[in-house]
Image: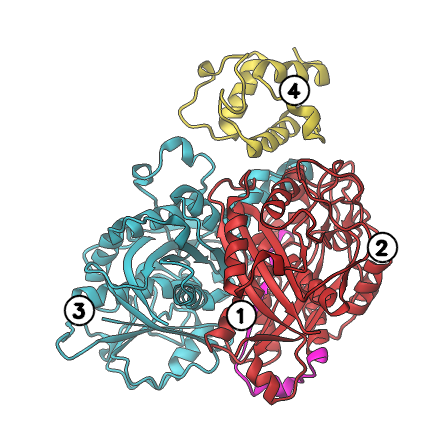
Chain colours: A yellow, B red, C cyan
Amino acid sequence: MSLENELKELIIKDLKLVDVTPEDIKDEDPLFGEGLGLDSLDAVELVVILQKNFQIETKDMEQSKEVFTSIKTLADYVRSKTGAQ
Amino acid sequence: MFAAITGFGCICAAGSSIGEVMMSLYSGKRNPAPPKKIAAGLEKLPPVFEIEDDLCKINSPKGLTRTNRLLQIALEEALKQADINREQLAGKRVGVIIGTTVGCTMVQESVYRDYKNHRDPHKESLFQGLYNNPALYISKEYGLSGPATSIVNACSSGTDAIGMAKGWIDSGLCDMVIAGGTDELSRTTYLGFNSLLNTSFEACRPFDKERKGLNLGEGAGVVIVENSDLAAREGRKRLGSVAGYGSSGDAYHPTAPHPAGAGLIRATMFALKCAGLQAEAVSFINAHGTSTVENDKVEGKVIRQIFSDSATVVSTKSYTGHTLGAAGAIEAVLSLQALLDGRVTATAGYENFDEECGIAPTTETTKIKGNIALSNSLAFGGNNSVLLLKGCA
Amino acid sequence: MTAHVLGIGTVSALGCGIDSFKSGLEGTAAPLIKEEEIKTPSGRIRSKAFRTEVVGLDRFMPKPKLRRIDNFLQTALMASYLSIEDSGLEIEDKTRTGVIFGSGYGALQTSLSFFDDLIDYGDKCASPTQFANSVHNSLVSNVSINLKLQGPCLTVSALEMTTASVFSTALAWLDSGAVDYVLAGVGDEYSKVNSYAAHLMGAEGVEAMKPFAFDECSYIPGEGFVTFMLGKKASPRQYGRIDKVLSGKDTSLADRELNALFLSANGDKETGRYYKALELPHTGLFSYSALYGGMPVGQGFDLAAAALSLKEGVYYRSSGHGITASNQAGPIKIDMTKGRTHIGCLQYDKDGNCSLISISG
């Protein structure tokens, strides 16, 4: 499975999104606000998802804003931190 | 008849009595540091305002939780100030209302770890968790006959407790109410706030442009609220009164405040109406001022909207840390003392004006006019509580 | 200070809604009791518990909104929607409706799940959502968010004195004129730790609750949520009027006005001794804990039963085993022509504090 799909599945499962499948989420779609409709509480939960599954520690929300833009930016970030493909 | 205040006391990282705490405040002394009594598996530990163990001395029964011990220290100080002994308490209808978060944790983490790892926890350790309700503890320990309840309204609990005490006195339910709040530092709140990414790795800076988040603290505050006629009859000196209280929900988000502070505005207006006062009558505001980006922005906006630009605002959390369920009670006690002293202290850590907050808190000890203090509390889930206290000059 | 009960919402082992609760009282429906294996110092045992299942919440809330709503929150939300629906009220000014809830134990399951993450994944993996949901007042905040209620919001906790604390505050709010209505509710959540605790209390191999066997431990943990829509003014659909809420040590039972007493005795020996010591002049003595299970806020469900009794004009038969001749009455028709009927709901805690809520109709 691609890292992008893995992230989609993790987000759906851990943020308990209802009636959303990985296919519904486009890699470039915004995760917050308009797009998937995530909010500030999801943002901090996303930090835990990265910690739990990729051992990536996020300390500053301000710096993470760009990283959390879309599945694509998130996957790029995970790759840069872990060397995953 | 009204809800008179005849005694108060507090303990927090700034000191173990109101005198000690005020000395720290006036001298600008504060020392947040990584926690010593709780362990956390984090690479970098956010600092906390922790109470030194030697401050926490009291003869207390074995197995008493730290939360209840802190509460009892503050209560003893308040009773001493009001000059009431245990026998006098027993002869009255005395109620207890205590705000807390940790104090009502029914299953402690250590007990659950044992349970989960099949190291059968003992009855005593399990039931200590079940029966450490602070209000019920005080009621039992002091042999009180009135109603007792703990308020678990997250960060506004201490304020709500004192506001409710006014209700219990006004309605004639009690002659006297022991009202306050208490919380010890715990792994649950420490790791919980850390997970919300709103704790700062530096000392907190309420309303400052560069603020990075809150520091947790621990402590307790207690106010003796009683029927003013009874206090006069028994010759107890009135130090102040609970003049008004307002509470309102944002109905907005589980952890974020309403962006325009709708609930806080309603709560403030209601507290003023309840006290029969205009905004101009308020001498100073002890803000919730946690130093998180969102809280200070919303709270600052509301203060500016309701009160004039030149309103005197202080955040005493800059000396005590955010003591959660105790915060509102400790802040009420510090506000009362400020009214008696006729001055408020500087807000530690504040340097740079933030347009988004729109207010500048005190930067030095400031003389106040009048005798009305307003104390704000904003809690998780969008609950806003506002207390108006009157001091007796 | 008084308040009229305008609507009730129950979520209990008997199902969701006041009608299912009534069926239980009438004896035509049985509570959901589940058995599971728990590890205790004396080995693995099978343990029973009264459990709730929330069905139909999507009738009130779109599914996507339910995503962060854990089980306990679901029971509170469901009960809240049901009580407003039951009242038939159209609330005009939502800033003048307060919400006050109480719980003896709080959101136990969520608190334990929060610990599970710390234990299984380490301190860095504390879940912010679970932390927020584990805070006692998350129920009230989520109810106020979803029902858009913007009056005062408060959560209290005082073990067996919780229900009294909720209602005395609700009455004070109404009396102060701060609100037109109050949504007042109490609830508790089951977790395996409750069964473990019940075992340590001496509830070993309990098959059925015997509320009137005060010397015997027959405690079976339960869970559920019950909410009441309260108002200053009476309405045609209402259940009765809450006249008095007393708690503490000095609540006098010598209230001769009471026609019947509903005891929250629940098979716990430590509180049982206080019910046993009561000198009860009353002819009507009832208990329904064997329908909803043992929990600190049992009194809330008894208040729902009392409200139903007044509405339907009948005392339902006590539930549970070991009911003796003196308390087997029911169903008995209440003679409502002889003026008001007063029912007292009474609960004790382990220190002998007493909570008395009286309702009349």
Disc 3 residue type?
A: Val
Structural distance between the alpha carbons of marks 3 and 4: 65 Å
Where residue C342 sits: x, y (%)? 26, 76
Where residue C317 sits: x, y (%)? 21, 68
Q: Chain of mark 2?
A: B
The residue to which callout 1 is attached is B166
Disc 1 residue type?
A: Lys
- Residue depicted at x 28% and y 53%: C14
**In this rendering, is residue B296 above or below C101?**
above
Relative to A73, B383 lies left or right: left
Could you tell me which secondary element the residue under label 4 belongs to?
helix
Disc 2 residue type?
A: Gly
Structural distance between the alpha carbons of marks 3 and 2: 68 Å
> Which class describes the residues within 10 Å of circle 4: few (<14), some (14-19), or many (20+)?
few
- Residue depicted at x 54% and y 24%: A32
Structural distance between the alpha carbons of marks 1 and 3: 39 Å
Q: Is residue C158 visible?
A: yes
Relative to C248, B112 lies left or right: right
* Magenta highlight on residue C202: no
Q: Do the residues bearing badges 2 and 4 touch, measured as CB atoms within 8 Å?
A: no
In the depicted view, which residue is nearer to us: C190 or C149?
C149
The residue to which callout 3 is attached is C314
For the N terminus of chain C, the image quarter is bottom left
Relative to B304, C23 lies left or right: left
The mark that comes first in sequence, 1 or 2, is: 2
Structural distance between the alpha carbons of marks 1 and 2: 33 Å
